[in-house]
Image (tube, rainbow, N blue to C red):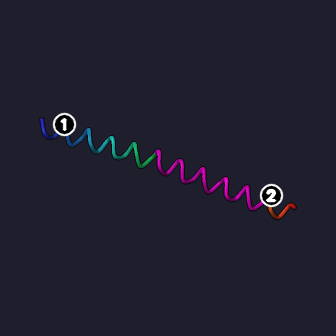
Amino acid sequence: MLQLFFIGKIIDYIGIMKIRNHEESKAKLDEKRGRVHDTDC
């Protein structure tokens, strides 16, 4: 039973990290776009 519990925790952790990485990469893309717009002005 404990093994299943730990596997579930690991899966949750991986899911959270994937979401965080996705949000971070989105923020970086937005930053790049913002810089591009700044240089255009």
Q: Secondary structure at mark 1?
A: helix
Q: Would you say residue 31 sits in the magenta stretch? A: yes
Answer yes or no: do the residues labelled 2 and 1 have beta carbons within 8 Å?
no
Residue 15, percent from left and from top: 39, 42
From the viewer's perspective, tell me whether residue 40 is left or right of residue 9.
right
The residue that appears at 70% across and 59% down in the rendered structure is 32
Residue that mark 2 sits on:
37
Which disc, if any, is residue 31?
none
- In the image, which residues are magenta? 19-36
**In the rendered image, which quarter is residue 36 located in?**
bottom right
The residue that appears at 67% across and 53% down in the rendered structure is 30
Residue 12, percent from left and from top: 33, 41
| Quadrant containing the N terminus in the rendered view | top left
Q: Of 11 and 28, which appears nearest the observer? A: 28
The residue that appears at 26% across and 38% down in the rendered structure is 8
| Quadrant containing the C terminus in the rendered view | bottom right
Residue that mark 1 sits on:
4
Inspect the image, locate mark 1, and give the three-letter code of the amino acid beneath it: Leu
